[in-house]
Amino acid sequence: MSQTKAYIAGCGSYVPENVISNDDLSRLVDTSDEWIVPRTGIRERRKVEVGKEASSDLATAAGLKAIEMAGISASDLDLIVGATITPDHLFPNTACLVQRNLGAHEAAAFDLSAACAGFIYALEVAKQFVISGTRKCVLVIGVDCMTTITDYTDRNSCIIFGDGAGAAVVRPSEGDSQIYETTLGARGEGDLFLVPAGGSRLPASHETISSGGHFLKMEGPKVFRFAVQKMEELLDAATTQNGFSKDDVKWVIPHQVNLRIMESAFRRIGIPMDRVIINIDRYGNTSAASVPMALDEAVRDGRIQRGDLCAMVAFGAGLSWASTLLRW
């Protein structure tokens, strides 16, 4: 008896309306469009309106689009897995808020935290539930409102991050479309990219607020070197363990970390940039949302066609990383 396969039946994405351009940032810190673009490839990013929008709102909007593409209703969902490092609250989990917003009352719901690699982690969780037969219709969401933890006096980090959400519906597959074997990994170096305060290590206090401890801190050069090396390793893992070669991959959908990193990595790998889905110029680094947002954009504009072999690669805080191969 053949094993059940899982595939992405539909995808969706959503970004806030508020656009933050490089010129906008130049009025906050000592920077310019001419400085930002060559170093990052970013021209603008989206930002939630604090107090009116949060991760659950973006996730709900993306989820609705994925549900519509999949041709199902919210009542068909039996599990929602959210990937985020910027939840609405420490608890309840953001997936539960999305469940309420969608009216998916039969669905279990939980979040996981793997930063920028979170969506692929969550996709693998959904796949395992589906192939085990314990769940048949899973909504996976990658969402982050990174601007809410960004220090807008730090020009090295504030130029990078934006807000957004991407979603996918995972169901059993009866055809060629499927999610293949996934690589997940981590290396415990949490000091390279973190928000120091707000957890049990450093609970919120006057001191943590005044010192900026609730904003993200990043060792940029170290993360850059790690990212270039890991991108190559992840793409190798995604293809070779599934019996394919890099030439078989029609599209690579990477975490939108930095255009320079992506160009450097794919130059070393030997994959032309016209086979790489890029949208960092318009959205910046949206953490767990970046891979599913890029997937959805490429599906909806017709670049990704039924039967295309696609590789997803991502890495983030932790340090954590993930890659997977899927047949659209």
Image (cartoon, rainbow, N blue to C red):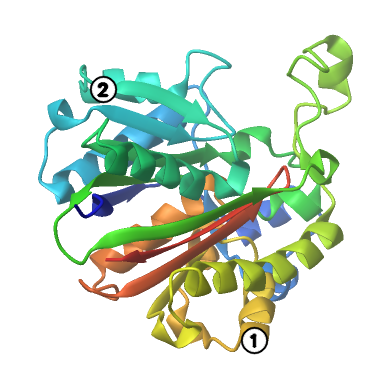
> Can residue 52 be seen?
no
Which residue type does callout 1 highlight?
A: Arg
Q: Which residue occupies 41% across, 46% down? A: 123
Vertical arrangement, residue 13 with respect to residue 268, above or below: above
- Mark closer to the chain start, 2 or 1: 2
Vertical arrangement, residue 32 with respect to residue 3, above or below: below
Q: Which residue occupies 61% across, 42% down? A: 115
> Can residue 324 be seen?
yes
SS class, disc 2: loop
Which residue type does callout 2 highlight?
A: Ala
| Residue 37 percent location from the top left of the image | 66, 71
Q: Where is mark 1, residue-wise?
A: 267
Q: Residues within 10 Å of mark 1 (few under 14, many from 20)?
A: few
| Residue 217 percent location from the top left of the image | 80, 41
Question: Marks 2 and 1, Cα distance to the nearest angstrom?
Answer: 43 Å
Q: Which residue occupies 37% across, 23% down? A: 109
| Residue 306 percent location from the top left of the image | 20, 71
Q: Quadrant of the C terminus?
A: bottom left
| Residue 65 percent location from the top left of the image | 23, 45
126 vs 111, nearest the viewer? 126
SS class, disc 1: helix
Q: Where is mark 2, residue-wise?
A: 107
